[in-house]
Image (spheres, helix red, strand yellow):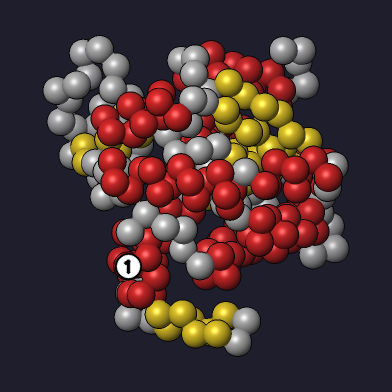
Amino acid sequence: MRNKINQKVIIFIGPPGSGKGLQANLVAEKFNLYHIETSELLERCFSEEKEKTFKIDGKRYQVKEIEKIWKSGKLCPPPFVVFLVKRKIKEIAQQKKGIVFSASPRTLYEGEKITPLLERFFSKKNIFVFYFECPKSVLKKRLLSRRICSLLRHPILNLKGMEKLKRCPLDGSLLIKRKIDKPEILDKRFEEFKEKTLPLVDFFEKRKIKLFKIDARPLPEKIFKKIEKILTNEPC
């Protein structure tokens, strides 16, 4: 692509339950960006392409076998994830829209493979990385009570008065719990984040891509206002 797309690319990095998905939805709506949620790409692939086998970098990946890994709480093989994400990036780039990522890249390998493609399409100056920090105890409490809507996957906060809510207030679909939000799986996911995802912070800093550390404990509204100010070049 000769002419780079003058649109923002926003990457949210953070442990499970830190609010990446919610903030990504808010930012995508505010700045008219496309929200790429890796878990949604995976779930859609598992649903629509379950019987397929993809050949990636000379190796074959059976979708139904990848699904078993995902359900166990472990990260899916990075080459497979990169394949899905890059496929989506190229699709969105053709539409000349900006992108928000809420769960990708998740490994150093993914960062090394995806970032050059983003720089080529959008340029480094348009890439913003937000790293969400939050104590594990807070995250675990959030995740064990977390629900999403079954249609558009809106995350529903477990705030006072919403505990008995059965349908999404935005689209009316049933609220469900994600299969991977279980105590025995959460500990694995936290360890996976520390070991495989956290190194991305150093990766982006060394690559001189703008990175901002965000306290993920305040209410979503306060976090969003801070992110909005950064993206609109207003002082925080």
Q: Position of residue 181 (x, y in %)?
A: 30, 43
Tell me, yes or no, if residue 8 can be seen here.
no
* Amino acid tagged 1: Lys
**Few, some or many residues within 10 Å of mark 1 (<14, 14–19, 20+):** few
Q: How far from the left and from the top, in percent, is residue 90?
A: 64, 63
Image-based side of 130 in relation to 162, left or right:
right
Q: Which residue is mark 1?
A: 68
Q: What x and y, as percent, mark residue 190?
A: 46, 42
Dot 1: what SS? Answer: helix
Instruction: Please give the name of the residue rendered at 45% of the width and 29% of the height, measured from the top-left corner.
Output: 136
Tell me where residue 17 sits by quadrant: top left
In this orientation, does residue 226 appear?
yes
Q: Nearer the viewer, residue 197 or 175?
A: 197
Out of 135 and 130, give the one closest to the viewer.
135
Q: In screen coordinates, is 48 left or right of 26?
A: left
Using residue 27 as the reference point, say whether residue 163 is left or right of it.
left
Question: Could you say which quadrant of the image residue 13 lies in?
Answer: top right
Residue 230 vs 167, above or below: the answer is above
